[in-house]
Amino acid sequence: MEHWGLTLPDVDATQDSAHGPLDEDEQRQLAEAHRAIDNARTARWMLGFSLEVVRRRRLHRGDGTRTWDQYLLQEHDGMSTSEADRLQKTWRLAQTVQKELGRPLPDSHLHKLRPYAERTSNDEAARAYAALYWAHQNGGVRLVANQVQQRVKKAVAAAKGVSDPAERSQAVSAAWVSAPDAPMPTQREDSVSRKDKGDDRGADPVDVALKLLEGAWRAVEAATEDEAARKVRSGEEAQRQQAGIRRIGRVLAKVKVEADTDTLDGDVVVDAELVEG
């Protein structure tokens, strides 16, 4: 705690004592807390690196008789060999992503990204993940593990049956970029330029609402891919949820976007209605 400069307050903050934007000291405390979180994530892949060193150099043997399993039991609180293997297989990818992204990725994201790296390379997977992460950040949408998994599935499926490693890597990379269900890095540049120019002030509320709807749509799509929930969901619940989604779609289809005046090819159009479908 001394290293991070954090101390626990004697009294918790309340709405009366802590309101409005964070002051300089509060910003420092928040930054230190985030650094501690990143440090913990970095420690995960460093553990994998350390385990690989111990195993490959047979440093686990101790007095000469200790096995690898015994080492994990005694020195790592009974860590399973499967967990140790997973950490050893993923630490290089995690390190590469951290260098590309400038921060460590969550362990759940790392697990979903592995198939992409296995079919391309750690460097390619790191560049792809960083582009996806920043596109979501600049779009105001939180990137979750299920979204990474969906895009990886689509990208990997594009290379099915391709035996040549170079062609397989190209097919996976192309499918990753062209997947329609998530923003890509060109939007990051546009978003940054708009913020720099202050163009986002006074944005059309319909555009703001559309962004919220897009985020909701992604959340629903990710939720439908949750295998654990699918296994316990009854047929009746699934029908109810499907009906709810369709009902929302029918309501949205009736929404009209109107403009008092609009200009098309130099002509002024009055009371134009833009109705989809």
Image: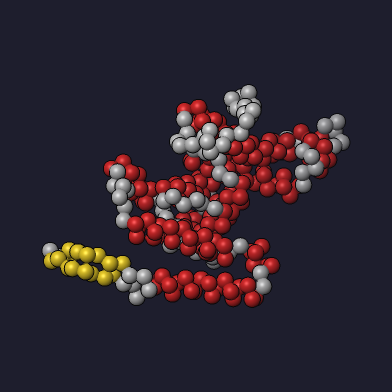
Most distant residue in the top direction: 2
Residue 88 or residue 27, whichever sits in front: 27
Q: Indicate the position of residue 96 as horizontal and vertical percent values.
A: 54, 41
Residue 57 or residue 104, whichever sits in front: 104
Q: Indicate the position of residue 196 as horizontal and vertical percent values.
A: 31, 41
Where the N terminus falls, by quadrant?
top right
> Is 115 located above or below residue 46 in the figure?
below
Q: How is the image coloured?
A: secondary structure
Left or right, residue 237 beside residue 116 = right
Q: Residue at x 50, y 27 (%)?
A: 25
Residue 145 or residue 73, whichever sits in front: 145
Left or right, residue 84 beside residue 196 = right
Most distant residue in the left direction: 266
Q: Residue at x 73, y 49 (%)?
A: 82
Left or right, residue 179 beside residue 148 = left
Most distant residue in the front direction: 16
Where the C terminus falls, by quadrant?
bottom left
How many marks on residues? 0
Q: Indicate the position of residue 83 as horizontal and vertical percent values.
A: 72, 47
Say if residue 254 shows up in the picture. yes
Say if residue 170 shows up in the picture. no
Q: Residue at x 67, y 73 (%)?
A: 234
Q: Residue at x 44, y 75 (%)?
A: 250
> Is 131 located above or below residue 98 in the figure?
below
Q: Indicate the position of residue 215 as horizontal and vertical percent values.
A: 46, 58
Residue 223 or residue 82, whichever sits in front: 223
